[in-house]
Amino acid sequence: MLCQSNEELNEYVKEAKRYTVKGKVADYIPALAKANPNDLSIAIHYPDGSCISAGDIEKKITLQSISKVISLALVLMDRGPEYVFERVGMEPTGDPFNSMIKLETLAPSKPLNPMINAGALVVTQMIKGADVEEKFERLLSFIRELADDPKITYNEEVARSEFETTYLNRSLCYFLKQHGAINGEIEELIDLYTKQCAVEMNCLDLARIGVVFAMDGIDPMSGKQIMPANVARICKTFMVTCGMYNASGEFAIKIGIPAKSGVSGGIMGAVPGRFGIGIFGPALDEKGNSIAGIKLLELLSKKYKLSMF
């Protein structure tokens, strides 16, 4: 077991929290600018149903880019890997998550991977459903099942804030549509994508989802196979290679677990066969990752030898 008590875990949180002053919240999304940069919390969910935690774990956070892993899992189940990866690549990128440069210089109709915004937009378009409402309800139902929490919904204020200001994602969509990677109405896709990013939950829910990925798609509490093992494996591989934006290589070396971050300050970790992790620390580094959250994982990985490598 990682830590023996909440008290022990709280000591690591206190140590990592000193790094929050070096980061800043995602103020380019108006609703996220309201976050307290000093917040830091963590929950660790084990397959036997036990959970340890530290910090204000009940505070709600929006998934933001963490949702990319979950939408990818749903689309892989909807469409199959062959269909998905004909349209989105599998390669990491050293560029920022919202960059357009590789689309222009490499393959304009095929984003490099599903964890950058261009790839995530193509993946979200693939969710099956007759309209935005049906597609979002299917995704939300899947998230609720993963977290075993039927009350999970989305934050309308954050979704609206992002919808009104997401000019770069609109640009990516129009570029992708020009090259045949996206079909249909751009505003409908942006509506779906901003709602997807605005799904909110607490650290306990995030850790609960992480443990399902860690256990190859099985909910260890119920024994139900929520997603095929191969889908969970593909998602965890992307989390290792692309999950921490263009800091994924350094993260793999220093910490070495499958993880996905979001610009709300959330991090979801899935330590294979062992446990799920949910972290919230809204002060971000220059790459868009929780600065104290990464430090916290670094401390825990070093102490408890979490690296899978």
Image (cartoon, rainbow, N blue to C red):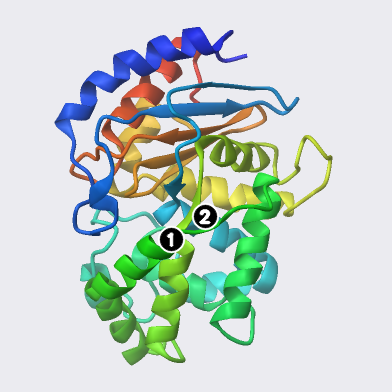
Query: On the image, which quarter does residue 206 sit in?
Result: top right
Quick check: 24 left or right of 207? left
Of residues 122 and 150, which is closer to you in this image? 150
Expressed as whole percent of the image width and height from the top left, the position of residue 190 reads 39, 77
Expressed as whole percent of the image width and height from the top left, the position of residue 296 reads 37, 23
CA distance separating discs 2 and 1? 11 Å
Residue at mark 1: 197
Quick check: 54 left or right of 32? right
Marks 2,1: beta carbons within 8 A: no
Of residues 11 and 171, which is closer to you in this image? 11
Residue 308 in sight from this viewpoint? no
Quick check: 170 left or right of 238? left
Q: Which amino acid does label 2 sit on?
A: Val
Expressed as whole percent of the image width and height from the top left, the position of residue 108 reads 31, 80
Instruction: Kindly report which numbered mark, 2 or 1, lies closer to the viewer in this rendering.
Output: 1
Q: Vertical placement of 216 versus 72: above or below?
A: above
Q: What residue type is labelled 1?
A: Cys
Q: Residue at x 49, y 56 (%)?
A: 67
Residue at mark 2: 69
Q: Which residue is drawn at 71% across and 52% down?
A: 145
Q: Vertical placement of 126 versus 161: above or below?
A: below
Q: Residue at x 63, y 38 (%)?
A: 208
Looking at the figure, which quarter contains the N terminus?
top right
- Secondary structure state at the residue bearing disc 2: helix
Q: Vertical placement of 94 versus 57: above or below?
A: below
Q: Residues within 10 Å of mark 1 (few under 14, many from 20)?
A: many
Quick check: 230 left or right of 252? right
- Among numbered discs 2 and 1, the one appearing first in the sequence: 2
Of residues 102 and 258, which is closer to you in this image? 258
